[in-house]
Image (spheres, rainbow, N blue to C red):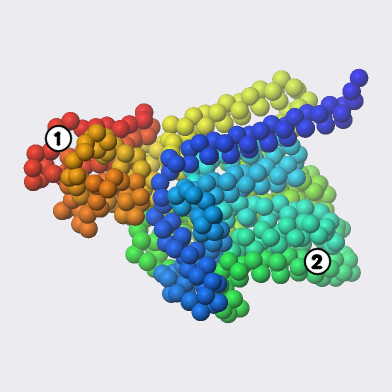
Amino acid sequence: MESSDEQIGQQNRWVDRFAVFVLCGLAILALLIVRDYGISNDEEVQHRYGELIVDYYASGFRDTALFNYKNLYLYGGLFDILAVGAAKLLPFDVFVIRHVMSAMTGIAGIAGAWATARLVAGPRAGLIALIALAICGPYFGGMFNHTKDVPFAAAVIWAIYFLLRAARDLPAPRWRDVIGFGLMLGAATGLRAMGLLLVGYAGVLVLMSVPRPFRVADSVAFLPRSALRFAPAIVIGYVIMIAAWPWAWLAPLNPLRAIFSFAHFHYEIRTIVAGEIYRMADVPWWYVPFYLLIKVPLVVYSGVLLAISALALAFARDGLSGLHRRHVETGFLVFVAIFPVLCEAIAEGPAFTGMRHFLFILPPLAVIAGIGFDATLNALSPRRWLEAGAAAALLLIFASNVSVLVRLHPYEYMFYNPMVGGLEGAARRYEMDYWVNMMPEAVRVLHDYLGLAAEKSPRVYTVGVCGEKFSFENYADKRLQASPGWLEADFFIAPTQMNCDRLVDGRVVATIRRLGVPIGVVKDRRGLTQKALNQPFDHSLK
């Protein structure tokens, strides 16, 4: 007869196997649907930036065009360099390659959330965190073409994982954990200067790991030894950062200058929240916190509240010195999730496209949610029927969120939770398809409307595009040409983002919908100069 410990061990192994199965399933799913996602507005310039970095090295540092290319020099180009290299080796469209790379990196981020929650609270918490992040629309939908924000989020969560592992062995952490942290620190800073936060997180975790009860003599010995042990990680991270971000090593303070430059961006970019339009520099202090509140599934926040409640109860019962390691690490994760958002709100920094630049907050939130739900199920375990009922309810809620994402596909990043009435309540009042992800579908339905597949005529149609012409040209038949002006065009393609679809008149011949909400339109403007076709073509997914 198996002992209780053996049964628990066997259950944990099955949970781990199922988690690996889910991760593999996500990878296969990503490969199957990757072509459904459009080219984002930033991808052309980001890929060009990667090419310029490669040219810089290939020329022996003589070709310095990258330092004058828009404002891209303020960012690391790690992903873009790798994408340029992959495009030279693989016989596929460069943007398909970028999207596959981004999707796989996003799944690596989901794996990082699983590993982190598993480390803190065990296999079940890890599995819940994995699912919680995978069903988060802004993260899953962003995996395919948010080629800077999602890789950055993946690097951050893996850096946190190695930090937590290293902290358990302070002041002498294992070298593999120190090196792992250094590699992820380099990956994060090689994408965004915000990755420097990880250095501060390491300092916070060292302070939280000071032996208790606190003694001055012990701390004097513990702190410098711990800091010194992390020094190789900082060196590794710095080397990767400057390799991926040449501007960073032109002057030692350039990475900090980049952060302060972001804080003072004043481009004429407009954004919308609660029906009000703002310039990016004038958004209210609550812009990012509020978007995080309404874009993340409520089930994730429920798990976060449960974790914080368990932490508060443990603190009230045992005091600071009596906290279990699980609670200390949960507190650290809560700090990691809150601190950047708090800084943004206090500084009233510029912001646009909702919470896009804070996608790196989502993996820690999913980890905390996994820990919270696991703690709740543990508390209910003496009454097995209650535990089973709670687990079943959680699975049903997850399944409900999955059904919403399926109906949104491939616009999962437009997910809104019930706090604003879902996508229907958010329509025309909040950020919608800001990447103009609807371009492939819009071009496809215009092809169908004109019957281009069957028509052999060389006749050319002009199309006005509310979005990047590059994206349109990547999908359009050669008989569809982007018009330099909207008013002169035969057709007009526009998302409903910021009411762009209402800027130009024309007969609506195609409407792209999800959950009954219009996401984009195709208009026939020939009716202004000639008779338009009579019947609209409604390309909807109800």
Q: Which mark is residue 245?
A: none
What residue appears at the point 34 percent right and 55 percent down from the top-left corner? 470
Q: Nearer the viewer, mark 1 or mark 2?
A: 1
**Disc 2 packing (10 Å; few <14; some 14–19; many ≥20):** some
Q: Name the residue at the left extreme.
A: 530
What residue appears at the point 73 percent right and 35 percent down from the top-left corner? 16
* Three-letter code for the amino acid on which mark 1 is drawn: Leu
Residue 469 appearing in the image: yes
Question: Quick check: marks 1 and 2 in contact, CB under 8 Å?
Answer: no
Q: Element at badge 2?
A: helix
Judging by the rendered image, the residue that carries numbered circle 1 is 533
523 or 87, nearer to the observer: 87
**Sequence-first tag of 1 and 2:** 2
- Residue 140 coordinates in the image, percent (x, y): 52, 42
What residue appears at the point 77 percent right and 32 percent down from the top-left corner? 12
How many numbered marks have been drawn onto this rendered protein structure? 2
- Residue 34 coordinates in the image, percent (x, y): 48, 41
What residue appears at the point 84 percent right and 26 percent down from the top-left corner? 7
In the rendered view of the protein, which quadrant contains the C terminus?
top left
Q: Is residue 253 above or below residue 299?
A: below
Q: Is residue 403 above or below residue 284?
A: above
Q: Which mark is residue 229?
A: 2
Name which quarter of the figure residue 468 lies in. Answer: bottom left
Q: Is residue 69 above or below residue 26?
A: below
- Residue 288 coordinates in the image, percent (x, y): 48, 54
In the rendered view of the protein, which quadrant contains the N terminus?
top right
* Three-letter code for the amino acid on which mark 2 is drawn: Arg
92 or 440, nearer to the observer: 92
